[in-house]
Amino acid sequence: MASKETLELVFTNQLGREVVLRVKDPKADLTPAQVTAAMDTIIASNVFTTAGGDLVNKKDVRLVSSNVTDLWNP
């Protein structure tokens, strides 16, 4: 069984819709300040755009942990 972690950066776009950016295997020692600063940079630089427009606000940050058991491996 393998353990996996994903950092989910949740934004809203110009239409108010939720947009989630997922980062696999984030650094273990990330702080909330580092993550929110990165999100501010993403918003300010318009790196990503969506069908609902540019990302305009931070909504949430989640660290998702999961255990994966491979039942069949050809």
Image (spheres, grey):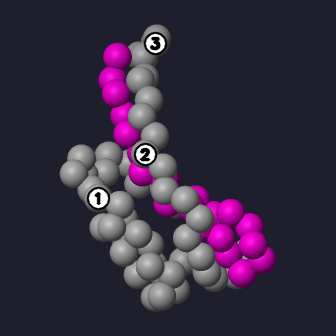
Q: Residue at x 35, y 61 (%)?
A: 32
Residue named by callout 1: 31
Q: Which residues are magenta?
A: 1-20
Q: Residues within 10 Å of mark 2 (few under 14, many from 20)?
A: some
Q: Are marks 3 and 1 in contact (CB under 8 Å)?
A: no
Secondary element under disc 3, as helix, strand or loop, is loop
Q: Residue, x 67% and y 75% (percent of image)? A: 13
Image x and y of residue 62, in percent: 48, 49
User: Amino acid type of disc 3?
Assistant: Trp
- Residue pictured at 41% horizontal, 69% vertical: 36
Please say if 10 is above or below 24.
below
Please determine whether, in this image, residue 49 is positioned above or below residue 34: below
Q: Which of the two labelled residues, at mark 1 and mark 2, occupies the earlier sequence position? A: 1
Q: Are marks 1 and 2 in contact (CB under 8 Å)?
A: no
Percent x, y of residue 29? 22, 51
Tell whether 27 sits left or right of 67. left
Which numbered mark, 3 or 1, is in the foreground of this view? Answer: 1
The residue lying toward the viewer, choosing from 36 and 17, is: 36
Q: Nearer the viewer, mark 1 or mark 2?
A: 1
Q: Is residue 61 visible?
A: yes
Total marks in image = 3
Residue that badge 2 annotates: 63
Image position, residue 61 (x, y; %): 49, 56
